[in-house]
Image (cartoon, grey):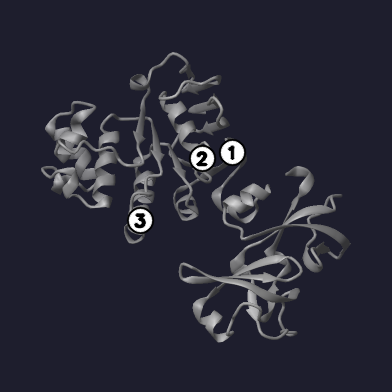
Amino acid sequence: MLLIADIEKRFEGRLRVEASIRIPYGPSTTILFGPSGAGKTTVLRCIAGLEKLNAGRIVFDGKDWANVGPQRRPIGFLFQDYALFPHLRVSENIGYAAKHSAESVKTIASMLKVDDVLNQWPAELSGGQQQRVALARVLARKPRLLLLDEPLSALDAAMRDHVRSELAHLLRTLGIPAIVVTHDWVDALTLGDQMLVMSSGRVLQVGPPQEVFTRPQHPEVAAAVGVETVVTGRIRRREGGIALLDVGSAQLVAADPGGEESDFYVCVRGEDVTLEKGRAEQSSARNHLRGTVLQIAIAGVLTKVTIDAGFELVALVTRQAAADLELSKGAEIFAVFKASAVHLIPKAHA
């Protein structure tokens, strides 16, 4: 492993952060994912040497960093606000930390496609250009590990999509391992090779982003990765690879998870739930629940519909579908979803 970090950081009267991270040699991007206040930035600052550990170790390429100061660690730290010096031109910002020659500054600037703005001031740049300049300044130090703290959060939605794809391409081509802090699931899926989900200072799950998003192993992870419905349920009967569960006053069908457990957290993504006015008997979906609309809210381009179906169930539908169904509070509706859309987390393991 290039980096072995076992971090324990305590703040008086506040959060205690405990996290273990392993970064292999070679290019890879590790995502630290979770809500604000989860401890993600603290982990980055500890690796950078900006926070001292209360316990644990940070070993980089076989060397213990216990007594290695921030300036002597071969890392590049891209801060959330990019931290460009407003009184220095782009070329001076890039060359600042490493005292590079004009020629090497131009080489780095060219690689990041900011060689045409070298004489401009940071305030004259777009959000995407500012990010590339900040990254160029970080790379000028020739780091062996990149730390990026919410690198896209300062951008508006349109710019964010564009810069995200640029950043994904850059991280793949630079060949430098990176740790990226984000609370945005699109960032995680686009940028990450592995992902650690943090909540309240603890790491709850580690794995490839797609696997973590589709198979959360903890109810807090399910909530953190955007699973809209997380409720408790109990298996009543198992047969032929299918489990019948009691959830609230309703019954659901799910794929049998195996094992001996009977009590589970039942997770259903809103986009997997279809709403219908009548019961569609010809549908291949195993779950057809009669319910009442409790709430309707706009959720970006979609409409979030909360239904009392014997338990509180959330569906995400297009605005056109909401209009066609003439949805209103108190309306009766059928919620339809497949058995495979129900993900079960054993309560005993959570």
Q: Secondary structure at mark 3?
A: helix
Residue 249 in the image: above or below residue 199: below
Residue 284 in the image: above or below residue 195: below
Residue placed under numbered mark 1 in the picture: 200
Q: Position of residue 343 (x, y in %)?
A: 70, 58
Residue drawn at 52 percent across, 76 percent down:
318
Give the CA separation, mark 1 to mark 3: 27 Å
Say what amino acid the circle numbered 3 marks: Arg
First in sequence, mark 2 or 1: give its number: 2
Label 2 crowd (10 A; few <14 / some 14-19 / many >=20): few
Label 3 crowd (10 A; few <14 / some 14-19 / many >=20): some
Question: Is the Cβ of the residue at disc 2 closer than 8 Å to that at disc 1?
Answer: yes
Q: Residue furthest left?
A: 119
Q: Position of residue 262 (x, y in %)?
A: 85, 53
Label 1 crowd (10 A; few <14 / some 14-19 / many >=20): some
- Say which mark, if any, is on residue 160: 3
Residue placed under numbered mark 2 in the picture: 37
Asked if residue 25 shows in the view, the reply is no
Is 254 positioned to the left or the right of 323 in the image?
right
Q: Secondary structure at mark 2?
A: loop
Give the CA separation, mark 2 to mark 1: 7 Å
Say what amino acid the circle numbered 2 marks: Gly
Residue drawn at 62 percent across, 48 percent down:
221
Quadrant of image for the C terminus: top right
- Say which mark, if any, is on residue 275: none
Say what amino acid the circle numbered 1 marks: Ser
Is 137 positioned to the left or the right of 326 in the image?
left
Question: Is the Cβ of the residue at disc 1 closer than 8 Å to that at disc 3?
Answer: no
Give the CA separation, mark 2 to mark 3: 22 Å
